[in-house]
């Protein structure tokens, strides 16, 4: 059984995982959907109630029924590098590739539907609440008056995008910023705005979840850090990430989140306050982990490889591929 | 509890359903996400482990927690009609609106994730096979040689798009066409191609499923029809749609399909052959039903209204909103 990795050609993180997979002797096929139909080919036949499908990449042929797992890492836009690219060809190639893969029994890291759903920040906050993770008071609104009242109750606020990154090419991260006390919220009417109580944080926590395995890292906030430095992605890089134990009750809540979100991989960001409480900020289902592994030496790539290499499909991990075994109405042909 | 309908302003099908809903006295809010943030407003607050959200449209305010159902009919692109539209505003508005709605307990017709998945033709074919629906032999391929071999086994073929409609604005339906006997399949290498055994059909069947209710209609093929006329959407409109009974075993298979696909609504197209067998062609999760209702008098709009008006959220219908009741780690704020 083969591991299928969907990603771009240049992907150091995938390279790290492939090294571990190769060491286990598990067959790996790596391809970029952007190379459909020039370098990557596909074929699937639905005959007599059965499906037989194949993918070909780099001169290797792999059976879709023989996939043990699919890692949706950083796939390119289907057929983007075809000789004559078009929106129509991309749509056809996307439906053909993912439509066939969706019908197979492989385990997914992560399934496209779960990945898509998991990107919705309001949904994340609600799920985190329901799983018992501490969530800083948050408002998402287009009502200026609601923003003003929220700012009265929580005078120390940050503002961040509702969605992840600005959709330019390449996408641009929009920093989380502190809200000035005298802010005029009138402009809230022109676009949904996410306001969140600022956590007076002592450290940033990155918790990387790979299946059941949780690996947390902590980056202390500099003693002299200004309270306006709220976004770790844009902070001065003075402290390294250090491994940290995950509190058991928090681990249970995180596992509940992953189970409900149907995610095999998630990168959680928390803010640790003065009491040592970890406040949920977000869970990025495709978050990078290379920088944490480099700093901490935590075996994240090894864990990903281990999850992908696990034998056979797991019914629990493929809720979207539940198989029906009802009798056929007739032998179809 | 309110019914929320997401659709464009001009939508005769939605109008039909609203008439029935109004007759039941169930509150209805209808809005187009394109009118965010000019005409439609939203606000959601995540505080102390709970969520309180509201939508405002046409001067009416509705609580997101008070929604009994959401009908995703023909919604516009979020914020498309804003004063200063942009890809960024659309992304923010989309995440805010659907992110909040995804966290609520309303029943969906259809849930966005289920709808998205259900559009994949290869996935449809595989699910239909698994549910025991007869599926005509089908090949989806970029290998010319695979196409040639398939054409030798099944000399009478049609070709159709892998995806639904051509992504122009407005989208254009691409007709299913018969494959000539002497076809050269070399061009298959440049784009995935769907070839399917032609069913020598006596009638087209449109089966509209609304929850558990199945309403089927039959349109006989004209006696003098040429075998090249394979696509009912482009056929001469001589025969009307007539109500027809759904064979019980086929009804079971269709219900299994809907259950596995997590769809509350689906428009199934079948081709009836000379033996009276219904061959599965596709299931359109957002298929129109007005033309069938007009021809047959079947109460489809009434059924949709009935499904939407049903009291209270049904856990079975909202698999993506499973609620966790675990103890909170702490009272968050």
Image: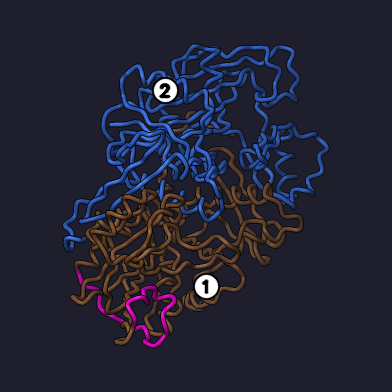
Chain colours: A blue, B brown
Say few, some or many: other residues with alpha carbon within 10 Å of mark 2 (under 14 / 14 to 19 / 20 or more).
Answer: many
Q: Is mark 1 on a helix, strand or loop?
A: helix
C-alpha gap between disc 2 and disc 1: 51 Å
Image quarter (top left, top right, bottom left or bottom right) of the C terminus of chain A: bottom left
x, y percent for residue A5: 42, 32
Residue at position x 35%, y 31% in the image: A3
Which label lies toward us, 2 or 1?
A: 2
Q: Nearer the viewer, residue B240 or B31?
A: B240
Q: Quadrant of the N terminus of chain A?
A: top left
At a point 54% along the width and 42% down the height, the residue shown is A81
The chain carrying label 2 is: A
Give above or below for B71 relative to B204. above
Expressed as whole percent of the image width and height from the top left, the position of residue A159 reads 70, 37
To which residue does mark 1 refer? B14
Residue A96 is situated, as x and y percent measured from the top left of the image, at 41, 50
Q: Image quarter for residue B32?
A: bottom right
| Along the viewing direction, whichever of A45 and B105 lies nearer the viewer | A45
For the magenta stretch, what is the residue range? B226-248
Q: Up-down: is A268 above or below B258?
A: above
> Residue B254: image x %, image y %?
28, 63
Instruction: Determine whether A216 is above or below B243 in the image.
Output: above
Residue A44 visible to an observer of this rendering = yes
Q: In this figure, which residue is indicated by the disc labeled 2? A: A18
Left or right: residue A194 compared with residue B237:
right
- Magenta segment, prevailing SS (helix, strand or loop): loop
* Chain at numbered mark 1: B
Residue at point 35%, 16% (across, down): A23
SS at mark 2 in the image: helix
Relative to residue A268, is residue B158 drawn left or right? left
Q: In this view, does A53 lie to the left or right of A122?
A: left
- Confirm whether the magenta stretch covers residue B244: yes
């Amino acid at each position: 059984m083969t591991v299928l990795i969907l990603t771009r050609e240049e992907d150091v993180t995938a390279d790290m995982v492939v090294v571990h997979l190769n060491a286990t002797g598990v067959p790996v096929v790596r391809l970029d959907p952007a190379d459909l139909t020039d370098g990557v080919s596909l074929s699937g036949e639905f005959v007599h109630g059965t499906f037989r499908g194949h993918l070909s990449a780099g001169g290797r042929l792999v059976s879709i029924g023989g996939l043990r797992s699919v890692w949706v890492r950083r796939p390119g836009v289907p057929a983007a590098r075809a000789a004559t690219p078009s929106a129509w060809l991309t749509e056809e190639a996307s439906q053909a590739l993912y439509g066939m893969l969706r019908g197979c029994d492989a385990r997914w890291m992560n399934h496209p539907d779960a990945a898509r759903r998991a990107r919705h920040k309001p949904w994340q906050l609600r799920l985190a609440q329901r799983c018992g993770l501490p969530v800083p008071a948050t408002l998402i609104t287009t009502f200026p008056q609601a923003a003003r009242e929220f700012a009265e109750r929580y005078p120390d606020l940050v503002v961040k995008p509702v969605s992840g990154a600005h959709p330019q090419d390449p996408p641009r991260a929009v920093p989380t910023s502190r809200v000035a006390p005298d802010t005029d919220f009138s402009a809230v009417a022109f676009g949904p705005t996410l306001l969140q109580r600022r956590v007076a944080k002592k450290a940033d926590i990155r918790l990387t979840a790979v299946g059941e395995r949780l690996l947390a890292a902590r980056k202390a906030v500099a003693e002299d850090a200004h309270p306006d430095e709220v976004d770790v992605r844009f902070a001065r890089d003075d402290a390294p990430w250090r491994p940290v134990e995950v509190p058991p009750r928090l681990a249970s809540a995180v596992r509940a989140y992953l189970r409900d979100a149907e995610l095999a991989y998630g990168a959680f960001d928390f803010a640790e306050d003065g009491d040592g409480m970890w406040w949920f900020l977000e869970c990025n289902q495709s978050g990078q982990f290379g920088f944490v592994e480099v700093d901490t030496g935590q075996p994240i790539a090894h864990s990903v490889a281990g999850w992908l290499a696990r034998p056979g499909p797991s019914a629990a991990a493929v809720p979207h591929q539940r198989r029906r075994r009802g009798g056929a109405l007739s032998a179809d042909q």
